[in-house]
Amino acid sequence: MRRGKLFREFPVTGPLRVELEGEGPDVSLRTHEGPLVRVEMAYGVHGWGYGAEERERALLSNPPLRFYGDLLRVGPEPEGVSLDYKLFLPPEAEVEVAVATGDVAVTGLSKKVRIATGSGDVVLTDIAGEVRVRCGSGDVSLQRVFGALAIRTGSGDIVGKDVKGDVEVETGSGDVALEGVEGELHVVTGSGDVRVAGRVEEETWRIRTGSGDVDLRLLEHFQAAVELRTNSGDIACTLPVKIETHEEGVLRGTVGEAPRARILVQTGSGDIILAQG
């Protein structure tokens, strides 16, 4: 296999949209200051002899990059070539990534981010804009994500810290662990534990899992209507709940004199914990 790297830079004078697609690349998108977009590609040309040399020459002379002033299109890979990408973008760039397999890491963007992977891990750090992730199988890691967030995975764990916008998560199989949540929350899992820590004022937290424990930790004082249900499991609540219904598998009541938030939990098989801390 013939290996190498190539680099391209493009001038940016206004809003930019980036579209990237590929069969199996690892993708890293980062921000930098300055009027340029920089693309770094690490390539591997499969095969030997004259055919591999021809594919390498074709790649170097005509890489899969197209720049139209306000739009940068990257990929897909030419036949017989594997590529990994590093893109350095203005913070205001909008990004759409679609790869069959490969890891995707995005850091520092403030506009819309769209990611679709068949399999591969996704890492999002310091994102201020709206985020949508679809992943067939792979883990999703979040840190300091402040915009509205929607994640759908077939299988894989979802872990996040300092998630400040509205959150919608759906996973067929995998654990969900989120800290620093401050917006609306909707979590659905087929199987997997759910752990969430955060703050509610007027928001609704709605969690449903087919099989798995649910552990919710609420920060500071709050007022909320609470409904916890499990078909097979225990319910433990250490908060000062004014109980309306408390029977096997069900706890319903309110916290505070004028509840504005709602906490709704349902699990087919699993324990539920609701506590402060």
Image (cartoon, helix red, strand yellow):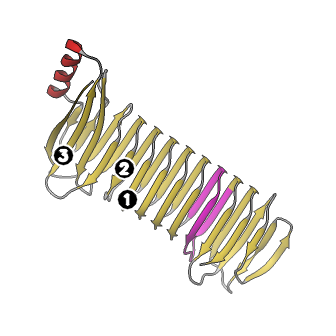
On screen, residue 147 versus residue 14, left or right, reads right
Question: Which residues fall within the magenta stretch?
Answer: 185-208
Read off the residue under disc 2.
Answer: 105
| Left or right of 111 on screen, residue 204 | right
Answer above or below: position of 95 versus 7: below
Q: Residue 205, image x and y in percent? A: 61, 66
199 and 193: which is toward the camera = 193
User: Residue at horizontal 27%, vertical 56%?
Assistant: 92
Q: Position of residue 173 (x, y in %)?
A: 62, 46
Q: Is residue 186 above or below residue 221?
A: above
Q: Quadrant of residue 219?
A: bottom right
Question: Chief secondary structure of the magenta span?
Answer: strand
For image coordinates 16% across by 39% down, the residue present is: 7
Label 1 element class? strand
Find residue 125 and name its label.
Answer: 1
Q: Position of residue 242 (x, y in %)?
A: 76, 82
Q: In the rendered image, which residue does mark 3 sit on?
A: 38
